[in-house]
Image (tube, grey):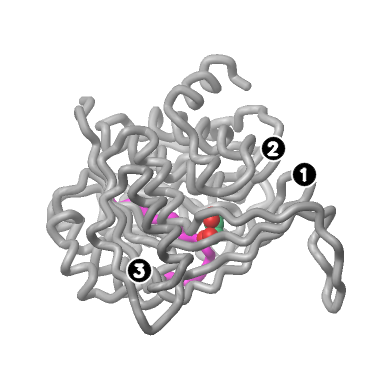
Amino acid sequence: MNRATPKVTVVGSLNVDLVCHAIRKPDKGETIIGDAFDIFTGGKGFNQATAAARLNAEVALVGSIGSDPFGDLLRTAVKNENINSRFITRRTDIGTGIATIVVEPDGDNSIIVVPRANMALTTADIDAAADCIANADVLLLQLETPIAASEHAAAIAKQHGATVVLNPAPAQPLPDSLLGYVDILTPNQSETELLAGRTVNNQDEAGRAAETLRERMVGSENSAVVLTLGEQGTLMLTETTSELIPALPVQPVDTTGAGDAFCGALATALASGEHLRSAVGFANAAGAAAVTVIGATPSMPTRAKIERLLKSGK
Ligand code: RIB
């Protein structure tokens, strides 16, 4: 089945990313001189919403920003990406979320997020967006906004038959009450280790950890864990299958936002009615495309770029 206009609602964060490019991140007590500085829009929620919107999904973002210049920057960016901004609340008592990011020459990144207004998102804000969540094909969640708000949104989505995708980033322990609403969980290696309480050093360990996580997702008959393993590819575990989908060989310049491109593309493909295996292949290519561009939001790829990558294999 292919739906004409896939509908994706994202409940999540909006940040401004303050990015330093440097030979390495500083050690404790050390100051180092960097090579370049950029300010980008970001936040896992906004990045994932942008990824879906650039792939032509109808996207709404439910979130919270401050009444400051960073909030203005994000509001304009949301509009420019054709994302429905009606459910983005502006707070007057707290500033917009920020992330300070160090990107090293091999493209690896280290991030400190100060969520600020993102953590002011309430269940009342979710109630205000209830129709938009209920009418979505896919609800997409991350962990830079309060868990109570995400859980409430997931409950509404499930009640109305939407697929719930949770990207459990940044890593933190999760209540079974939230996992019980999740259809598809997309952790990376370190998030899997924290959530499953197991090490993930090879494919066998990844499979066992993914199975431990899937056992906690009791509310969904078709639950799946889609474990992103960077250069090793993506492990997809369902009730009946376990498959490693290899990563596409690309030259990384900045890995920031690769997981967001993956999740936004996965949500869009699922919302279009694609089967999980084909959606994961598409998302894999979206993640690969994102690491070839500097910045988080700027690296969210177009459909043409993903299709080129899938065709050429590099
Ligand atoms: O996933 C990348 C994002 O993480 C950045 O844009 C930053 O804002 C943090 O939320």
Label of residue 252 in the image: 2
* Label 3 vs label 2, nearer the camera: 3
Report the span colored magenta. Answer: 164-176
Mark pair 3, 2: CA separation: 31 Å
Q: Residue at x 56, y 44 (%)?
A: 258
Q: Earlier in the sequence, mark 3 or mark 2?
A: 3
Residue 49 coordinates in the image, percent (x, y): 37, 48
Mark 1 close to ligand 1, CB under 8 Å: no
Q: Mark 2 touching mark 1, by CB under 8 A?
A: yes
Q: Amino acid at mark 3?
A: Ser
Q: Residue at x 52, y 21 (%)?
A: 310
| Disc 2 packing (10 Å; few <14; some 14–19; many ≥20) | some
The residue tagged 3 is: 64
Q: Residue at x 60, y 45 (%)?
A: 229
SS category of the residue bearing label 3: strand
Q: Amino acid at mark 2?
A: Pro
Residue 105 coordinates in the image, percent (x, y): 79, 46
SS category of the residue bearing label 2: loop
Q: Is residue 73 visible?
A: yes
- In this rendering, the answer to whether 2 lies above or below 196 is above
Label of residue 106 in the image: 1
SS category of the residue bearing label 1: loop
Q: Residue at x 37, y 43 (%)?
A: 81
- In this rendering, the answer to whether 255 lies above or below 170 is above
